Amino acid sequence: ASVDKGVDFANYFCTYAFLYHQKEMLSDRVRMDAYYNAIFQNKHHFQGKAVLDVGTGSGILAIWSAQAGARKVYAVEATKMSEHARTLVAANNLQDVVEVIEGSMEDVTLPEKVDVIISEWMGYFLLRESMFDSVVCARDRWLKPTGVMYPSHARMWMAPIRSGLGDQKMNDYEGAMDDWYSFVKETKTVYGVDMSVLTKPFSEEQKKYYLQTTMWSNLHPHQVIGTAAVVKELDCSTATVNDILEVRSTILSSITGGSTRLCGFGGWFDVHFRGSREDPAQKEIELATAPSMNNGTHWGQQVFLFNPPILVSEGDDLNVSFSMDRSKENHRLMDVELSCEVRQSSGEVLPPVRNRFYVE
Amino acid sequence: ASVDKGVDFANYFCTYAFLYHQKEMLSDRVRMDAYYNAIFQNKHHFQGKAVLDVGTGSGILAIWSAQAGARKVYAVEATKMSEHARTLVAANNLQDVVEVIEGSMEDVTLPEKVDVIISEWMGYFLLRESMFDSVVCARDRWLKPTGVMYPSHARMWMAPIRSGLGDQKMNDYEGAMDDWYSFVKETKTVYGVDMSVLTKPFSEEQKKYYLQTTMWSNLHPHQVIGTAAVVKELDCSTATVNDILEVRSTILSSITGGSTRLCGFGGWFDVHFRGSREDPAQKEIELATAPSMNNGTHWGQQVFLFNPPILVSEGDDLNVSFSMDRSKENHRLMDVELSCEVRQSSGEVLPPVRNRFYVE
Ligand SMILES: Nc1ncnc2c1ncn2[C@@H]1O[C@H](CSCC[C@H](N)C(=O)O)[C@@H](O)[C@H]1O
Ligand SMILES: Nc1ncnc2c1ncn2[C@@H]1O[C@H](CSCC[C@H](N)C(=O)O)[C@@H](O)[C@H]1O
C-alpha cells in the first residue's frame, strides 16, 4: 500500500517543522548524551568518512559528525526544518562538510555511498512513526557493504506495572457515559429525537479513547512490579521492513514485589551503538528509555492498562502474548493485541485477560 | 487551487467522524433551539417539500425536517458519521423520508431539485472551515429558483474588548524565550553547538503561537468595552464563494465603558432564518453567538489581542481596518490583518497598532 505524501505531511511531518518540537528532543539530556558519546567516543568511525544523517531535523547529528572529523555529511530532512539546519550548519562553520538536502529520504539521490548512517528514528515504544522504514531504505541504497549503523541495535521491552491511571481513566469513561445518558434523555424530551440507538457506538468510541489508547507515562521504577522482558530485537544492519510490519511475541515475567495490583504493562525501548562486527565501536554506548528516577526521556514509556486490575503476589508468573500491527488507517500508528495469563505460585492459573490497544 | 481530498480528510473531516464531537454540537442549546424553532415554527417551508441537509452529521436537521412534514430529505455527509445518521433515522422511523448519502456534497448527485437547503455550516468566526463553499455549491446545483435557504442570512461582528488573556499569553511567550536562552547556553557549553542563530526564527514561531493565534473565548458581556460593528453580511441565497474568499472591511466603534484597557477585539457571528423574499418565514429566528451571560455557544468568540493594551476612555473612537484571507497552507483556516487607530475624545489620534493573526 503506497502512502499519500500530502496526507503523511498533514498527519506526521507537520510537528517536526516546528523548532519548538526539535528543541524538546534537543533538550532530552539522556538522548543527547547517548548520541554525543556514541559519536565522540568513536571518532574512528567518522574521521575522514562520508556520513548520512536520515532525518536531520535541526542538523545536530550531522554537525556532531562533522565536528568528529567526517569528510562529508549528507543531512536529509523532509520538512522545512532543513532551512534552519542549513543556517545552523553555516553558523557553526561547517558548510563545507555538511550538505543539507530537503526531501524525503526515499526520493533523495546522493553522489556517493556512505560509511556511516546515523539517525534518530525511534518513536514511542520504538516503532511508532514507522520511521525505521526510511532508515532501511537509506541503508539498502546508500550504505557501503563495510558501513556502520548508528545506532546498530534496538530492543523493545515490556514489564508488568501498577498505576493509578487505570482507575482514573475508568472514571473518565464512566463520567462520559453518564453525560451521554443525560444527553439522550434531554434530546428526547426537549427535541423529540431518540438517540439511544447510538449509545453502543458512543460507548465503543469512548472506550477506545479512554481505555484502549496507550498513554505516555514517566513511570517510577517502583511501579514496575515484575521482571522486564524483551519483546523484539533488531539488528539495524540487517533488519528489513518486513521484520517490523508485525511484531508477535510471547513473553514471560515474574512478579517481584509483594502482593500488589497488576494494572497493565509498560513498554519502552533501548538502542545500542556498537558499530559493526568488522568495525566495532571503541566504546559501546546505550540509550535506554526504561523507567528511571533521574534519567527519564521525552519518550517516557507507553502504558497498556487492563481494567479491572488483577491481584498478584511475589512469585506469580505471567505469560503474555503480544501482537502488534500497523494501523490500517495510518501506517505510522500501531494496533496492539495483548493477553496475559497469571499462574499463581500455588499453581492455580487465573482466567486470561485480553485487550486491544491503539498506540496513537 | 484544487484541494487534496486525502489531506482535507486528515486535517478537517476527521473530527466530525467522532460521536463525541457531534454530541458537543447537539448539546449546544442555543444552536439547537435556533434550528429547532426555525424548522417547527416555519413548517410551511417543509410540509410536502424536498429538503437537502448539507453535512448532516448525526442527522439531526434532516430528522427534524422530516418530522416537520418534509416529503423527502436528502442528508449528505462526507464522513462515516453517515452510518450513525442512517441508524438514527431508522430508529426514529423516518427511513421512508430521509435518505442518508455518504459523500462530499461536491460529488453527490440528487434525483431532483429541492425546495429547502438546510445546513449548519458555521465555523469559528463564521467562516473558519470554509464549509459555506459546499453550501454554495449545493445551492447553485440543487436548489429550485423558488427555494429557500436555512439559514438565509449571516453576519460577522467585531467589538473592542478587555481581557486578561493577553498578559497571560505574553507571560507564556516570555517564559518560552527564557527557556530558549538557557537551552542555547547549555547546548553550547555541554554539546559544543551554537544555536543562537535560531533565536530569531524560534521567537517568531513562538510569537505566532502565543501572540498571533486567535483564541477561543467565552467572553463576559462586561468585557466588551465599545460598540460592536458588522464586518461582513452574507445573503445565503445569493452569496458566492468569491464574496468570502477575502473579507475587507473598515469598521468604527466607540468606547462605551469608563477608562479601561483596550486589549484587542472579539469576533463572532449571527445567522438568521428569514426564508426568502417570495416565501418569507412565518416566524423569523436568530442564532447569535455574541458574548452572553446565559446563552453562550460552543462557538464562543474568537479573540484577537494586541500587546501591550492601550488605555482608552468613554467616547474614544476606534477606526479599525480588517482584512481576512484564507491561509495558503490550508484553505479552511484564515489569516487576518487588523489595524486599529484610536481617536481620543480630546481629538488626539494615537499611533495605530497593527497585528497579523491566524485563525487556526
Ligand atoms: N523519510 C524521511 N525523509 C526525511 N526526513 C525524515 C523522514 N522521516 C522522518 N524525517 C525527519 O526525521 C526527523 C526525526 S527527529 C530527529 C531529528 C534530529 N536528527 C535529532 O536527532 O535531533 C524529523 O525532523 C523528521 O521530519
Ligand atoms: N462538503 C461536504 N460534504 C458533506 N459533508 C460535509 C461537507 N463539509 C462538511 N461536511 C459535514 O458537515 C457537518 C457539519 S457539523 C453539523 C452537523 C449537523 N448538521 C448538526 O447540525 O448537528 C460535519 O459532519 C461534516 O463532516
Image (tube, coloured by chain):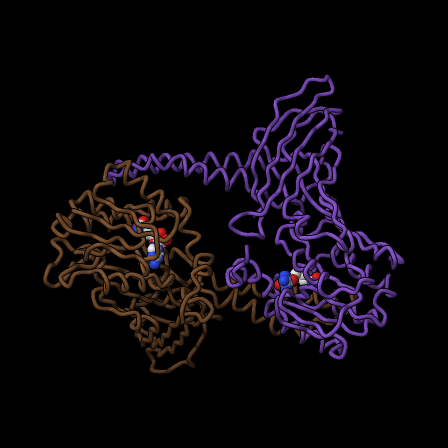
Chain colours: A purple, B brown
- Tell me the quarter of the picture where residue A267 sits: top right
Q: Left or right: A52 with respect to A194?
A: right
Q: Which picture quadrant has residue B161?
A: bottom left
Question: Is residue A32 placed above or below B229 in the rendered structure?
Answer: above
B146 horizontally vs B208: left or right: left
Q: Quadrant of the C terminus of chain B?
A: bottom left
When the figure is inspected, residue A149 is found, relative to residue A174, above or below; the finding is: below
Q: Nearer the viewer, residue A263 or A295?
A: A263
Quadrant (top left/top right/bottom left/bottom right) for the N terminus of chain B: bottom left
Please report the residue visible at 53 percent of the width from the left and 48 percent of the height from the top. Answer: A328
Q: Is residue A127 visible?
A: yes
User: x%, y% of residue A55?
Assistant: 67, 64
**Residue found at x 38% / y 55%:** B218
Q: Residue at x 66, y 50 (%)?
A: A242
Residue A173, percent from left and from top: 48, 36
Name above or below for residue A109 compared with residue B62.
below
**Residue B166 position in % (x across, y down):** 48, 64
Splitting the image into four quadrants, where does ligand 1 fall?
Answer: bottom right
Query: How many badges with numbers are in the image?
Result: 0
